[in-house]
Image (cartoon, helix red, strand yellow):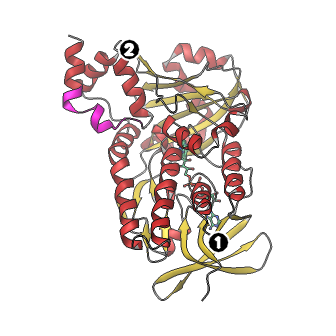
Amino acid sequence: MTNKYDAIVVGARCAGSPTAMLLARQGYKVLLVDRATFPSDTISTHLIHPPGVSLLERWGLLDRLTATGCPPIETYAFDMGPFVLTGSPGTEDAPAAYGPRRTVLDKLLVDAASELGADVREGFTVEEVLREGDRVSGIRGHGKGGPSLTEHARVVVGADGLHSLVSRAVAAEQYNEKPQLEASYYTYWSGLPMNGRFEAYDRGDRAWAAWPTNDGLTLVIVGWPFAQFEANRTNVEGNYLAAFERAPEFQERIRAATREERFVGASVPNFFRKPYGPGWALVGDAGYNKDFITAQGIADAFRDAELCAGALHEALSGARSFDDAMQAYQSTRDGHVLAMYEFTCQFAAFTPPSPEMQQFFAAVHGNQDAMDGFARVFAGVTSPAEYFSSEHVGSIIGMAG
Ligand SMILES: Cc1cc2nc3c(=O)[nH]c(=O)nc-3n(C[C@H](O)[C@H](O)[C@H](O)COP(=O)(O)OP(=O)(O)OC[C@H]3O[C@@H](n4cnc5c(N)ncnc54)[C@H](O)[C@@H]3O)c2cc1C
């Protein structure tokens, strides 16, 4: 069997397009397919924290993003009820976050992959993963209304999201699983200016967040425990709006705004998947999915794309065995995200803070370095393991006297 391609990437959004782009940039022959066509929307609230923005900058794509008029977000404000923790999530190389619509972001990514030489097939659905012996060797699929086609490659990369067909076809092992923890609904508002701020509100069994996106709109997402999903699903709008009664100032602002789009709802399970095996790899949500409450998915997908493309380059060029290179990809990915995964799941479970944590947050309030630090934890810049270590917690409480 001759391979027309070095790699076939299934899925062309946050994980797939950068993986294809980075491989094509190394000179590999890459086919990138997606059943969607671009621009198109997908279920996501699309906040990109500074580490993700920093990768866009490194790939030469940040200027294209800012040219769409998407405003920078320089301040994160966490309203805990009795006080607000206001800090800067930025780093030296990426001072701001952005919240671009997925219609904007994903188009920009798929175009970049194409410009760097990947063959892009939009509107192409993969139906089957092909094998030769125990190795994955290609895909079978079809364009819209077209005949069934097969393509072969040295590796097939599943960047096909949460319900990944590639991961199912190879029976990728799942670990660290946790069930759905929250249910959330979001929509877009005009007339709700955010002035460069991301705002999050924590009110018992309700949490919500608001931030600016393209076209002068503000996204507002409201979540509640998954246990309340069934009871609340018949009156999404009523339950969404009722949450704001718990923060009258915000309620006043949103009452003066206009809802521009329908409500979109989601709830997701939490898991890791082994991201490689003979002839296949997984990136993005296909390999690691977590609740969206801390908005890590896009930056994680970007980082995975760099790690996975780097490992595939080592394997395809013969610098390292496929198994060694991909094992390093898996352990680097897991090492990077594990503490954030636990933090995210705890948050999504609406676990009330312990008395010690309440004391800690009260001490953080008013300590600008500590508030910036918390914003950077939420942004995925600083590890929660470091920030919530007993030494750090003790020192902040000590400073507050
Ligand atoms: C409600 C919600 C809010 C979120 N908010 C945020 C946020 O604010 N910030 C953040 O960073 N993350 C957020 N996330 C997570 C983020 O959206 C994902 O982590 C990110 O989209 C993962 O990108 P991906 O490329 O791995 O997968 P996806 O974006 O899901 O893309 C997968 C692609 O694969 C294609 N595909 C699937 N199967 C096939 C097939 N058989 N053949 C061809 N193509 C196929 C699909 O068409 C799709 O285009 C949110 C998620 C949800 C559900």
Residue type highlighted by circle 2: Pro
Q: Is residue 333 left or right of residue 310?
A: left
Q: Tell me: 162 left or right of 365.
A: right
Look at the numbered disc 1 and say if its residue's Cβ is closer than 8 Å to ligand 1.
Answer: yes
Tell me the number on the disc at residue 126.
1
Is residue 291 visible from the viewing direction of this image? yes
Element class at badge 1: strand
First-in-chain label (2 vs 1):
2
272 inside magenta stretch: no
Is 280 above or below relative to 386? below
Taking depth in this image into account, of 169 and 130 the one nearest to the observer is 130
Residue 24 position, x and y percent, is 62, 62
| Mark 1 closeness class: few <14, some 14–19, many ≥20 residues within 10 Å | many
Residue at x 41%, y 45% (from the top left corner): 181
- The residue furthest right is 145
Q: Secondary structure at mark 2?
A: loop
Q: Quadrant of residue 62?
A: top right
The residue that disc 2 covers is 82
What range of the chain is rendered magenta? Answer: 381-392
